[in-house]
Amino acid sequence: MKNDWITAIGMMSGTSLDGVDAALIETDGVEVRRLGQSVFVPYTPELRDRMRGCFGNRSATNSEHVVADDLTRVHIDAVDMLLGKAGLSPGDIGVIGFHGQTVFHEPASGLTRQIGTPDMLAEKTGIPVVADFRLADVAAGGEGAPLAPVYHAALIKSAGVEAPVAVLNIGGVSNVTWIGADDALLAFDCGPGNARIDDWMLRHTRNPVDLNGATAASGRGDLMVEVSFLEDPYFDRTPPKSLDREDMASLLDGLVIEAKLNVADGAATLANCTVAAIVAGVNHLPVAPKSWFVCGGGRHNDYVMAQLGARLGVPVRSVDELDWDGDALEAECFGYLAVRHLRNLPLSFPGTTGVPQPCCGGKLYIQKKAA
Ligand SMILES: Nc1ncnc2c1ncn2[C@@H]1O[C@H](COP(=O)(O)OP(=O)(O)OP(=O)(O)O)[C@@H](O)[C@H]1O
Ligand SMILES: CC(=O)N[C@H]1[C@@H]2OC[C@@H](O2)[C@@H](O)[C@@H]1O[C@H](C)C(=O)O
């Protein structure tokens, strides 16, 4: 390994609220070597409910502080587990990238809120922590999201995939990174990913997932719901653009309830809307991608993957086919962004968040020295 390379842990608590992904990478802030080590620590249903209760908070509340500390403890466990699994000690790690949990995202009002307690994480692990990744971008007039594009681009470069190519993340919300032949970048959130499907399944089956898309595959999508959903002005908006997890929630829930769908037809309809939102985004891309690589939990939904392939008409593959870890990619990304912070390299660009100039971001938290 070169001297100026840093071993980093990245951690992501995504919009689906399922738990914490933590992953190890080595990087100089430009190139990256994935170490293939990651862990996932699920939230308890009780903590998940309390986290959900923070959604929509425009400012911190007392109960939110408690939730922030509790979710940080899960991150501390994730670091311990990851170090144990990799046979490393805290002294081997240069930095932790800690995303925290987004509870509110409204960049037009200059607000994006990720909760978590980075100084507690630094204190308990003894490892420097970089957090608050989205704040500088929003303060500079950007969307604050998505931030993964610079990491997607670094991985695509080393994979030698033919451009233009799209990397698609289907998490609670879905987002795409388009990479052109000249390394040009365009990125944006496409629409709801798994979040609406998860909420629908939880309401009807008490299990918050349509495992492998089996329920959707046994149902019939309601075309009228899909057509009404696509009338949302977000789809015509020129990117870069980003979404809060709850954006379009009441629209979509309302349409599905009004259509009086059974559980299978509802799952198929919501999955079709996830796919339709992604396909609608193609109109905004400078040149249609030759292929799509999909990461995030949604790539396990076979129904969504099949529909995407059929509607996009070009190969749609899981990123695992490039030997990447599609479940840990976002976690790895925040390790990469933490090192970019240390190296004073930009995290976001006009084509990825709409920020006027390439923008550095993140804030460093270090363990206080004993008196
Ligand atoms: N086997 C599976 N079949 C269907 N869906 C799955 C499967 N495994 C995971 N998922 C979906 O993936 C979701 C988790 O995906 P992921 O961890 O990428 O989301 P996230 O990181 O929380 O979200 P975001 O990227 O928006 O922040 C689950 O909520 C579930 O809906
Ligand atoms: C505000 C916020 O937390 N946005 C998340 C969310 O989850 C997916 C999508 O919406 C993306 O914009 C972003 O996360 C990824 C990691 C990103 O910034 O690239």
Image (spheres, rainbow, N blue to C red):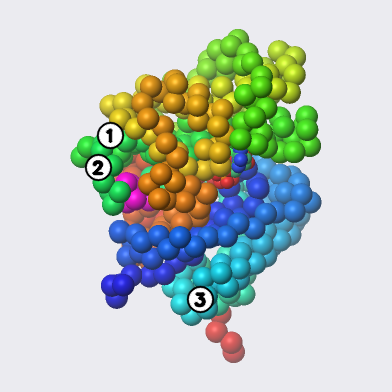
Q: Is residue 350 above or below residue 95?
A: above
Q: Position of residue 89 (x, y in %)?
A: 52, 78
Give the mark nearest the N terminus, 1 or 2.
1
Which residue does the image show at 38% across and 65% down from the upper left? 26
Quadrant of the frame with the C terminus: bottom right
Question: Magenta stretch: dominant SS?
Answer: helix
The span shown in magenta is 150-156
Q: Position of residue 166 (x, y in %)?
A: 36, 36
Give the mark nearest the N terminus, 1 or 3.
3
Residue underneath mark 2: 183
Q: For the residue marked with disc 1, what is the amino acid?
A: Pro
Q: CA distance from mark 3 to mark 2?
A: 35 Å
Q: Residues within 10 Å of mark 1 (few under 14, many from 20)?
A: many
Q: Position of residue 174 (x, y in %)?
A: 51, 35
Residue 88 marker: 3
Which residue does the image show at 57% across and 16% down from the upper left? 226
Please report contact status of discs 1 and 2: CB closer than 8 Å, yes or no.
Answer: no
Tell which tag, 1 or 2, sits nearer the viewer: 1
Q: Position of residue 103 (x, y in %)?
A: 63, 46
Q: Is residue 154 magenta?
A: yes
Q: Residues within 10 Å of mark 3 (few under 14, many from 20)?
A: few
Q: Nearer the viewer, residue 146 or 81?
A: 81
